[in-house]
Amino acid sequence: MRATIIRGRCHSWQRRHALGRFARGHASCCLHPAVVPFAQRGARSSDATVDVAPEFAPASGTERTCPACLAVHDAAVLRAALLVCPACGHHLRLTARERLALLVDAGSFVEWDAGVGSTDPLGFVDEIPYPARLGLARAKTGERDAVVSGAARLHGRPLAIATFDFGFMGGSMGSAAGERLCRLFGRARGRRLPVVVVTASGGARMQEGTLALVQMAKATVAIERFRRERLPYVAVLADPTTGGVSASVAMLGDVILAEPGAQIGFAGPRVIEQTIRAPLPAGFQRAERLLERGLVDDVVPRAALRDRLAALLAALGGGEPGR
Amino acid sequence: MTLNGSAARSVPLRAPAAEATAWERVRRARDAARPRASDYLAESFTDFIELHGDRAYRDDPAIRAGVARLAGRPVVVVAQERGRDHDDQVRRSFGMAFPEGYRKAERLMRLAEHFGLPVVTLVDTPGAHPGLGAEERGQAGAIARTLACMATLRVPTVAVVIGQGGSGGALALALTDRVLMLEHAFYGVISPEGCASILWRSSARAPEAAAALRLTAPELRAQGIVDEVIPEPRCGIARAPAEAAARVRRALDRTLRSLERLDAAELLARRAARYTALGAFAVVDAGGEEAP
């Protein structure tokens, strides 16, 4: 068997590690008790060794590994399952376009404001200048920024929809995302369309400084003006939804749905662990826990999401069918 | 105004000067001797009557709120209080509010609207509380609904950033018609330490991060996020807290007078326009639909 590095994901911090580290009990990530069992889910025990079977060899080309249980699936099979792992039910992250393809009627999406992109208001340089980082993210995702928005139909009924792309700088909200959301709600208000936003974001984009922070305020103002028209806004919280996006766009839905297993919260788990100086309890900041706490309306499996959204929008009104 | 006695222990800071670096301003904003919200409540306002609790869970001491008079007129004031001495700081969780604190803020803002009173907020927090309890009681939703409340209030609203403006926890009280800021306060998307540890894996490089984040009052004024910078006394704000409080009162009075001339519809329209205009983006022709 070839020398391989099988990677697992820390359940708490979402960091990826070589599986061997988990197997040796070297929880180099966060000392989270869930690390070892999580990485070894599918293995017989959480004992010190994991058999790396040949069929666990790295996926190449048309194979894809579930980041939760490490099962390798044919990419086409996984796609047919809506990127929900057939082995463990883990909901893999979707790009903004994959999400649109999943939710709206085929061929119905008309993009709005595709040309809106952030500039570099602060002249910010991290490891590389911010414009270069934007360039890398654009090349990687094919998107201009982290939010894709437009009009579409769902079961024939028109709606306005925006989806976040976590692959674009962690779905971070800067001026471009704020502007696209603001225009989305404004246009939906004018055309009397209901709005669906699917969030997946680490929060405000640090590279744009306080201007990124106030995009929360800008989006909130747009949402509240929209709400005055008594049109429905449904937020769908995908993995992960944290920080400024969670404390504005995500939590302002008339109805808030979440995907199974999605991490949802305000502060990042690392910050909280540093504050309380203890590992986080299992299930903390997970969609199911938020449901139990009364913080979201429901947790909806991906396969049922489209029909659930259609039924909700039909009940709440807005967007005439077949128009 | 009371000095809290820690002036002697506080880090020596050079006299305030126009060329103060971002990091010097961050240190001044955090200085234990710097006046706190309670000092302004006592000196800039009169007849402060504190009102407690979110009517659901508990009273969060990180936020002090109530009715008061500002230059004679009744207002509702909502203030983040970081605490006087160690015990007080612990009790007030260093000004880091919990969801119930934001719900108290929202409740009192609605009270202000109900009785047609302007709302004044004092911002001074390292950020919203990051902990298990805060998360499980819905920190994100509490902040979001406070923002939504401030977006829709039909009365004049003014925020003053008096010290630390820490991220979403600060913004939650600063979606206002006008945002004023003391000269050496700061207001940022992330703490300089947090930024430095993400970018360079070293919180020791916080001074660099503070400069890169452009979080000082003059820089935020230039970005359109802050409307007015209130100068601090030349001798240092900790040595002249009464003078600082008087300046805050005068700036608030002047700002409120200009807002009180506007009716609710005009206030809401201008507030929406103010926030809609914030952002740095470019539009290129990328196909798709652009026209409204």
Image (cartoon, grey):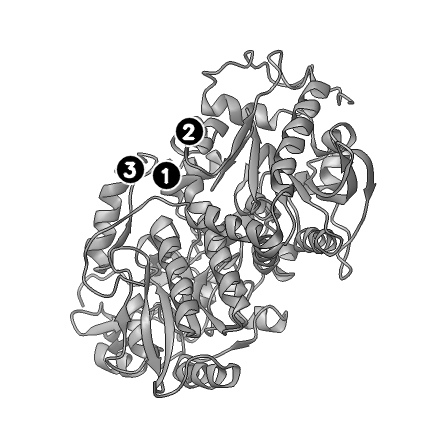
Q: Amino acid at mark 3?
A: Glu
Residue for badge 2: B205
Mark 1 in CB contact with mark 2 (< 8 angstroms): yes
Q: Earlier in the sequence, mark 1 or mark 2?
A: 1
* Disc 1/disc 2 C-alpha distance (Å): 9 Å
Q: Is B133 on the left or on the right of A29, as rendered?
A: right
* Disc 2/disc 3 C-alpha distance (Å): 13 Å
Q: Position of residue A115 (x, y in %)?
A: 24, 56
Q: Is A175 on the left or on the right of B45, as rendered?
A: left
Residue for badge 3: A127
SS of the residue under disc 1: helix
Q: Which residue is located at x 47 percent, y 74 percent?
A: A260
Q: Numbered disc 1: what chain?
A: B
Q: Quadrant of residue B250?
A: top right
Q: Position of residue B52 (x, y in %)?
A: 80, 50
Q: Quadrant of residue A161?
A: bottom left
The local crowd at label 1, few if under 14, some if 14 to 19, many if 20 or more residues have their Cα within 10 Å, is: some
Q: Amino acid at mark 2?
A: Arg
Q: Position of residue A117 (x, y in %)?
A: 28, 51
Up-down relation of residue A78 to residue B164 (above or below): below
Residue A99 appearing in the image: no
Q: Numbered disc 3: what chain?
A: A
Residue for badge 1: B199
